[in-house]
Amino acid sequence: MFSFDALQEKATTVDASELPGMLETLESWTTYTESFLKHIEAAVSESDKNLSVRMQKEREIEKFAAQHKENGRTTENISELISFDGPKDTVKRSKRH
């Protein structure tokens, strides 16, 4: 594989015999860069999806809080009833003797 300094400031002449090696290097970099960009795009997409889900849950909680505010419930009471997974189920248990 051919190696050269991409930050080199002066123009240089490359021997024609080195061109195939340069092409191979550039193709390799291109393949790696494309793969890396696909990985980044997938990670950003997953992050966006997670953010969207969280924002939807937060809107549901805000709506729930607004609906129950008129009933005299405080924010603290509401937060005990709900989580980001939605309202908690409450089960009354009978006392066993």
Image (spheres, rainbow, N blue to C red):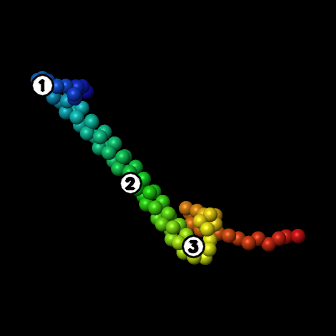
Work out whether mark 1 precedes mark 2 in sequence or the reverse, and give the earlier one.
1
Q: Earlier in the sequence, mark 2 or mark 3?
A: 2
Say which residue label 3 marks. 69
* Quadrant in the rendering for residue 86: bottom right
Q: Local crowd at mark 1 within 10 Å, few (<14), some, or many (≥20)?
A: few
Judged by depth in the image, the label closer to the viewer, 3 or 1, is 3
Q: Is mark 2 on a helix, strand or loop?
A: helix
Give the number of the disc on residue 45. Answer: 2
The amino acid marked with disc number 2 is Ser
Q: Which of 18 and 10 is in front in this view?
A: 10
Question: Camera-side residue: 8 or 4?
Answer: 8
Q: Do the residues labelled 2 and 3 touch (CB within 8 Å)?
A: no
Earlier sequence position, callout 3 versus callout 1: 1
Q: Mark 1 points at which residue?
A: 11
Q: In this view, does 73 lie above or below 19?
A: below
Asked if the residue under mark 1 is in contact with the one under mark 3, i.e. CB atoms within 8 Å, the reply is no
Q: Is residue 69 left or right of residue 18?
A: right
Q: Pinpoint residue 74: horizontal percent, then vertical percent.
A: 61, 68
